[in-house]
Image: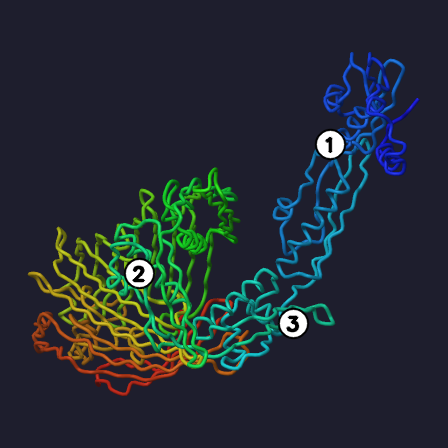
Amino acid sequence: MATWTRSTTALLAALAILLGAAAAPPAAAQDAPVVANVQRILIEGARRLDEATIRAYLVVREGEPATADEINRSLRRLLDTGLFDDVTLSPLADGILVRVREAPFINRVAFEGNEALDDEVLRGSVQSISRAAFSRTAAERDAATLLDIYRRSGRYGATVEPVVIDRGEGRVDLVFEIDEGPVTGIRSIDFIGNVAFSDRRLRRAIETRESGVLSAIFGSGTYDPDRLEFDRELLRRFYLDRGYADFEVLSATAELTADREDFVVAFTMEEGDLYTFGPIDIQSGLPDLDLEALREAFQMQEGQTYSASDVDATIEELIFLVGQQGYAFVDIRPRAVRDDEADTVGVVFEIAEGPRVYIERIEIEGNTRTVDRVLRRQFRVAEGDAFNAREIQAARGRLRALGFFDRVDVATERGSADDRAVVNVEVQERLTGALQVGVGFSSADGPVGDVTISERNFLGRGQFLSARVNVTGDQQAFQFQFEEPALLDRDLAAGFSIGYVRLDRSDESSFEETNAGFRPYVGFPIAPDQRLELRYRLSADEIRDVTRDASPAIRDDEGTAVTSGPGLTWSWDRRNDPIEPTTGFLVELEQDFAGVGGDTAYTRSVGRVKGWQGLLEDAVIASLEFEAGAVFGLGDDLRVTDRFFLGGDEFRGFARDGIGPRDDSTITVPQVDEDGDVDPTLPRVSVVRDDALGGNYYAVARADVSFPLGLPEELGVYGGLFADVGTLWGLDETTYQDFPSRANPTVTVDDSAKLRASIGASLFIDSPFGPLRFNFAYPVEAEESDDREFFRFTVGTRF
């Protein structure tokens, strides 16, 4: 009696190869039944699985003959299920005997030795799960997956060993024993072949970072092979944007050090010559195309340093302008005209009618939490629109900019026909909620406490939600904000904020201020790099706890006033990076109105423009900013809280509210007893008020330069120099009657526009608690009444 087991299949294959055609039986012999009529199928060894399940995998059937091929295929199908450790099929005179040894099932999957990665993260990455059949092959595959995860997190010394513990009765525990090992850092990043740019500058152009002795504190980078490949492209773009049209990265290697604790990364390159733009022209095969109008799209001119980004930006603008002239399908290709002797690259933009390809579908995968429409609205094209490869790539950039995903892959493939394309989007989500707790000390405000809870992708809808409580020595604030970034699935941001602030201004102006307000707003683009925000302000502003010797200009405003009115902000943003720009500018104009109901009526205008420029290979960043504002009362005089104030971070070298019109008159006030009551038996004493009143107008210019100090980059320490110049002036009235006592004369305040100026130095430190800035300032032009400040440290970004 023949028996088919796991080894029978291999034996039959070997015999077939050895015998070959010389011994090949006729086809009829191969199909001859081993069992003429299968009257019964006996199953032995099944414990957890019922017989019907096993029979379902068999090819042989009762009441039919069974050939050797059918028995062999039945054996393979049972083994392929992974439910059995061994299977034997034995022909009987009147049937088939199936003996099985079931694979044990997994009682539980556990992880031991992991600290850097949680169990839940690891569990979601393996295929072996509880109550499933155990497979040694699957366990080894899972171990390799876990090892890959650890390597991608920078732990190349990690080991993962699957251990099987027999629990009896066909049950096993699968335990992955993990030795995470230390984080494998980058000991050094070397560049070979660079002449035009230093190693320090090129390190800033790539994402990979060196680690060092303080990596654990300052969060230096770890080795990632995918990031290394991306760095090759970053280097190529860096050189192409700076005139090196022949630049090439010959190799990018990463080698483990002898102690296997770090990598040494090396980029070998050829820079080539520096090129400038030659003649720039347009050629078109499309009829009735206005070429002169298209020349306005040129982002460069002859003689400028060659830049691939300028070429790409010109192509995007040309596609837009050609589309406005009625051509939806265009193919614009830049043809380089090189002159190696003159080191110039001329560009001819060739415009032709492109193939008519439409988007058939946009398929999205991997977004288990984020709803599809949040991703789809990042595409400026929809299903059925003309295919635009540049817009597809731009959509990928917008998806990455959301900050919702660790990985975004966008690929295009042929659809159901040659003129149809399918866009496949695959993402890997990341956590978007945050709880931030900060404790610190400010030179201006004393102890600082801050708690912020935020969610950037609320309910997977892309909405922003934030609640913040901030407490300092002089201020207590609460703010709640909600924003829908794409109302009605359009590029229309809408939201609101509710806040309450209590500010102690007794040191500067002899009163306390409270504000409780509600501000709804909408924002939308009006050009590719311009946005407009419309808002409404409704707030109750109270001036309270005015001291006995406060200026009459402040005492007159004591009480609560309701402010109600619309406002808008127009912004024009041409920065190359919104966090740490090295070139470009930002222009903002703000206009607010009050008087739509409420107790106050005024119009307030503020304008600011700031430009950045990198010097010495962007190691030095210079910025220049101009800012000015004006507020005009409509009817009644302005309250002190509606005016502008300058000082502190807005005008370095002077304390908060430190410059501008102020009541610095000397008055006599009665003395008080221990209970705070006036004691008429004591003589009056003279005091100087020194109350800042603010101003209706201001103008200020700020110049900054930041630069490295030669310390290791991992320390994140930079230096800076700055200079501020400006003034704050203007009051509705300058003469106030000091009504509490006829012994005090009428107060007259100087509100003229007197120039102030300061210079100083800054120290920036990228600390684990956030970026710190220390300012050392010296006022070179000031008034005697100004409140000077020579030192201040704050939390903020490098300018």
Task: Give the CA distance from mark 2 to mark 1.
Answer: 58 Å
Callout 1: 10 Å neighbours few (<14), some, many (20+)? few
Q: Which amino acid lies under the numbered mark 1 shown in the image of this protein?
A: Thr
Estimate the x, y position of residue 732 in percent, counting from the top left.
Answer: 9, 70
- The disc placed on residue 102 is none
- Tell me, yes or no, whether the two marked residues, 3 and 2, touch with CB atoms within 8 Å: no
Q: Can residue 454 be seen in this view?
A: no
Disc 1 on helix, strand or loop?
loop
Query: Which residue is rendered at x = 45% and y = 53% of the image?
Result: 396
Q: Label 2, on which residue? A: 529
Earlier along the polypeptide chain: callout 2 or callout 1?
1
Q: How crowded is mark 2: few (under 14 residues within 10 Å), some or many (20 or more)?
A: few
For marks 1 and 3, give the CA distance.
Answer: 46 Å
Counting every numbered tag in the picture gives: 3
> In the displayed structure, would residue 785 be above or below residue 363?
below
Tag 2: amino acid? Asp
In front of the other: 762 or 160: 160
Q: What residue is shown with label 3?
A: 264
Can you identify the residue that label 1 sits on? 81
Name the spot of residue 731 as percent of width and height, x first: 12, 72
Residue neighbourhood size for the residue with mark 3, other residues' Cα within 10 Å, grouped as few (<14), some (14–19), many (≥20) = some
Q: Is the residue 247 above or below the residue 179 in the image?
A: below
**Distance from label 3 to label 2 (Cα)?**
41 Å
* Mark 2: secondary structure: loop
